Each structure stands twice: as structure tokens, then as C-alpha cells.
Image (tube, rainbow, N blue to C red):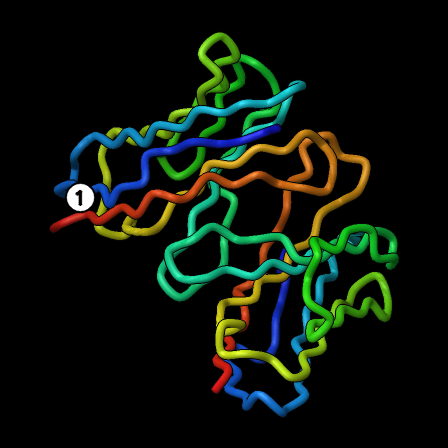
């Protein structure tokens, strides 16, 4: 079946550090891939998405590239801020009603 | 309007109470979802409504009863809950017929069952 695997963390970085959160997936078809972010006490927000191989999603300085050959969708940001502290979920969808979420990565940014 | 709204924000109820959670969206989306999220876990799908009809029930106990009165509203009726049902309940919506199934989430209702 379909699945998403991501580093669970917590990940602790200093402000302005480079961020990578790894995400790999298993899917039978050609899924769309997402990164959702959940700030403390809030619901999930879509951070970025990619719908086909080699697409790059980007938003708020975050980027992720859909790599079919390595079945990966790693999240990167060049310089993190304290306000980026949150839980990040990698997810996939094959166009039906279900989204498969990874377990989430908790990110702490220290000032 | 690109928001999904949920009320109430917080709810405390006893095991014999009956309460309802409400969700609303005005984006013209025709699919709506209920998720349950426990602390430090990803959301777990409970129900999906597609064109106001229940299309997926992920073997949820009958003490949770969903209702979709119209294309903009989704309710979750709660009755005789257990303390382990305490969680954040998230509503989401999406267009139908879109390959990527991007879902828009509400802020959630934090439920505590005493």
C-alpha cells in the first residue's frame, strides 16, 4: 500500500541555519505530494505541493522537489526563523479522497 | 473566502453528554472530511462526504455520527464518548475531480471528554 516516511525529530536548529527534512514515499501510481505545516494550537496549513515528477513546490522560502527516481520529496529552507517552529507533515494523494500522512517532524528554532 | 471554519474551538463534555461539532466552508468544495488528531500524531481520517453523501467511513464507532446538511456545512454529532476520544477534531474540504486532492483544513475543535 501507499506510505510516507519522514524523519520524526525533534529537529532543533539555530536561527538562520539551513533546514532539510527528509521524506520518502511508496506509491503504486503517480501521486501528488504535499508538505503541510501545523503551528502550535492550530490546524494544518498547506505549505507547498508538487503534482508530477521534477516539479518544485515553493512557498515562504521553503522548497521541495518531486524526485521520482528516489521517491523523495525533501523539504528545504536556506535560513530558518524562530517563527518556523512547528510540526511539518509530508503527505501524498493519488487523487482519491485519502491523503496519506507521514508521522510528522517537530521543528524547534532557537533564537 | 478561502477559509474552513470550525466551532466551537474548545469543548469539554461528560461521557453522558450529547454535543455537536460544526464545520463550514464557502469555497464551493464538494468534498468534506472529518479527521481526529491525537497529540504528536498525524491526522487520522474518520469520514468523507462527497457531494453531500457519505463516501468513506473509516470504521469509526457509532458514538460519532456525521451529517452533511448541505454542500457548505458538515457536522459531527457526539454521544456517549469515552475519555480516549479526547483529541483535536479537524475538518477539511477539497474540490472534487482534481488530481491532486489538495485539502484545506480548519483550525480544529479541541475536545476533552471527562
Name the residue nearer the viewer: B95 or A87.
A87
The correct choice, above or below, for A81 with respect to A56 in the image is below
Q: Residue at x 72, y 32 (%)?
A: A95
Residue at 83% of width from left, 57% of height from top? Answer: B54
Q: Chain of mark 1?
A: A
Q: Is residue A19 above or below residue A109?
A: above
Q: Is residue B89 left or right of residue A18?
A: right
**Residue depicted at x 35% and y 28%:** A22
Residue B16: x %, y % from top left? 62, 91
Residue placed most toward the observer, A110 or B57? B57
Up-down: is A108 above or below A33? below
Q: Secondary structure at mark 1?
A: strand
Residue B66, quarter of picture: bottom right
Residue plotted at (12% across, 42% down):
A14
**Residue A81 as seen in the image, left or right of residue B52:** left
Q: In the depicted view, which residue is nearer to us: A67 or B18?
A: B18
Q: Is residue A55 above or below residue A107?
A: above
Q: Which residue is mark 1?
A: A12
Quarter of the image for residue B70 reads bottom right
Coordinates of residue B93 in the picture (x, y in percent): 69, 53
Quadrant for the N terminus of chain A, please: top right
- Residue B113 % position (x, y): 50, 82
Residue that lies at the very extreme toward the top in this rendered image: A69
Left or right, B103 with respect to A25, comes to: right
In percent of width and height, residue A93 lies at: 63, 33
Amino acid at each position: 500500500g501507499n506510505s510516507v516516511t519522514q524523519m520524526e525529530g525533534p529537529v532543533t536548529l539555530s536561527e538562520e541555519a539551513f533546514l532539510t527534512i527528509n521524506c520518502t514515499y511508496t506509491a503504486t501510481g503517480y501521486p501528488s505530494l504535499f508538505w503541510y505545516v501545523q503551528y502550535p494550537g492550530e490546524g494544518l496549513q498547506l505549505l507547498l505541493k508538487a503534482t508530477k515528477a521534477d516539479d518544485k513546490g515553493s512557498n515562504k522560502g521553503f522548497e521541495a522537489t518531486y524526485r521520482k527516481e528516489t521517491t523523495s520529496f525533501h523539504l528545504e529552507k536556506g535560513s530558518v526563523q524562530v517563527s518556523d517552529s512547528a510540526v511539518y507533515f509530508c503527505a501524498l494523494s493519488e487523487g482519491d479522497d485519502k491523503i496519506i500522512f507521514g508521522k510528522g517532524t517537530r521543528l524547534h528554532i532557537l533564537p | 473566502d478561502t477559509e474552513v471554519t470550525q466551532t466551537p474551538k474548545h469543548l469539554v463534555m461528560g461521557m453522558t453528554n450529547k454535543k455537536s461539532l460544526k464545520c463550514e466552508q464557502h469555497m464551493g468544495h464538494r468534498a468534506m472530511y472529518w479527521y481526529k488528531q491525537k497529540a504528536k500524531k498525524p491526522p487520522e481520517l474518520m469520514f468523507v462526504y462527497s457531494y453531500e453523501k457519505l463516501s468513506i467511513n473509516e470504521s469509526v464507532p457509532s458514538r460519532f455520527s456525521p451529517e452533511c446538511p448541505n454542500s457548505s456545512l458538515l457536522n459531527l454529532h457526539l454521544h456517549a464518548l469515552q475519555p480516549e476520544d479526547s483529541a483535536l477534531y479537524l475538518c477539511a474540504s477539497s474540490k472534487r475531480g482534481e488530481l491532486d486532492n489538495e485539502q484545506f483544513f480548519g483550525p480544529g475543535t479541541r475536545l476533552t471528554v471527562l
